[in-house]
Amino acid sequence: MRSTTSETDSGPDGLKEITTDVPARLDRLPWARWHWTVIVGLGVVWILDGLEVTIVGNLSDALKSSDTGLGLSSSQIGMAGAVYVTGSCVGALLFGQLTDRFGRKKLFIITLLTYLLGTVLTAFSMNPAYYFAVRFVTGMGIGGEYAAVNSAVDELVPARYRGRVDITINGSYWLGAAGGALVTIPLLNPDLVPAGLGWRVCFALGAVLGLAILFVRRNVPESPRWLFIHGREKESERIVSEIEETVERESGEKLPAPEGTITVRQRHTIGLGRIARTVFKDYPRRTILCLGLFVGQAFLYNAFFFTFGDTLQTFLGVDQTGAYIALFAVSNFAGALLLGPLFDKVGRVRMISATYIVSGVLLAVAGVRLDSLTAVSLTAFGMAIFFVASAGASSAYLTASEVFPMETRALCIAFFYAIGTAVGGITGPLLFGRLIDSASAAKDIGGIAVGYYIGAALMVGGGVLAMFLGVNAERKSLEDIATPLTAEDADASSRNADD
């Protein structure tokens, strides 16, 4: 057994001060097929989110019909997006706290089931009020997934791959977006599928994918890092040993000896007061950085993408928006896939600041030229902007998941996602929905340019924050980037004993 414990230090609850090399053992693993199981089982949440958001954006005309849809206005389409995002914020905060307390695996099963319930119920919507309610439930599941899954992925992926894996997984949102856009083309064709049925089938597709992933996810283990901190070091050792045996067999490589150990004082739970002090008192610069990154990317994406289909249909005479959105989505995923490795090679600070600033400037240029753009040229502009912005937006999740102590990881992801999304993701769709309504009445697409300028300013601001407050976390162990609170407890106990 590689982990050592001090039996004399055991408390009445059986918790101990232990020294373990579990983090070093996980970080020195070569890439193997086992890691793909983790990525497929956990990372698909972003595909589901992309599917949901794209379907809603692409169904605007179908949902507006009072005969075969729900009779929604453009403002109500924006309201539905805001309700979905509000549910995501609530779900992130609720499930994020539970993830840090009860473990990653229990919660990423519960959150997926919550999503499945919400999206199935959406397919049976009969009026706007019911639709808003079930979109809230669906959003809760997705928001909870972000907290549970991001923390689990970072704790299972070796340090030298963490940046590119996180960026690519978050960018896989756009695989869902492309799929959602393409499937709506035949399903919204009344010659193929009855108008009142097609949009309902679109929502049901998310449940089919979610059920398939549920079976894969059962094979993903609990985070060994979470286990040894919460008094379950024997289970942590067993899981890591099984992972090592699997990776050695799949890679054909004999693993090198791990380098480094960490000493922690185990705890069942970490109080919210301690977490708040950690985030706001111990790491204020990182807190400001994460807030800036999340607000910028949330406003940019939720404002532009929630209403992209509506903009094409309302101002540019596009009947079927699926092909345009699919092209836009492919560009986003390509950006995350191709730029992701640079976050490990060039570095976090340089890449985060560059992607935020460049995409912000390009969005401002698109706003200036909005009056002269066609459906094709607006889509081309969007593809160029979000090729860069996709990697930047994903880096916000990467940053929040790796720059705070392990015991707070899921809740920190949830907190910054909720605050940033509440500011950018709720106000964005509401603002753009109203801008589209007023611009449509005036028959002037230039009326929505103000939304582009706000998004551009927030993205550039996030990039500037990264230049001054960014953390060089590339290729470093999570425990080196932010010392676990339980390690600080052990260190304090040792100093007190010496005194």
Image: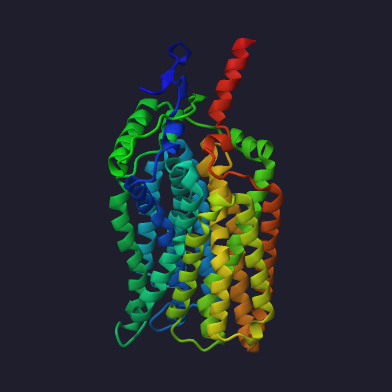
From where the camera sits, is residue 130 visible?
A: no
- Residue 281 in the image: x percent, y percent? 68, 37
Which image quarter: residue 104?
top left
Going 49% across and 27% down the picture, which residue do you hit?
A: 260
- Residue 83 in the image: x percent, y percent? 52, 63
Going 58% across and 77% down the picture, which residue do you hit?
A: 381
Depth check: give the residue in front, 192 or 334: 334
Total residue callouts: 0
**Location of the N terminus (image quadrant):** top left
Q: Is residue 435 above or below residue 133?
A: below
Depth check: give the residue in front, 244 or 182: 244
Which image quarter: residue 236?
top left
Going 47% across and 22% down the picture, which residue do you hit?
A: 19
Which image quarter: residue 233?
top left
**Location of the C terminus (image quadrant):** top right
- Residue 410 in the image: x percent, y percent? 50, 43
From where the camera sits, is residue 6 visible?
A: yes
Q: Is residue 81 above or below residue 314?
A: above
Q: Is residue 231 above or below residue 116?
A: above
Depth check: give the residue in front, 63 or 285: 285
- Residue 463 in the image: x percent, y percent? 67, 57
In the figure, is residue 477 to the left or right of 237? right
In the figure, is residue 425 to the left or right of 188? right
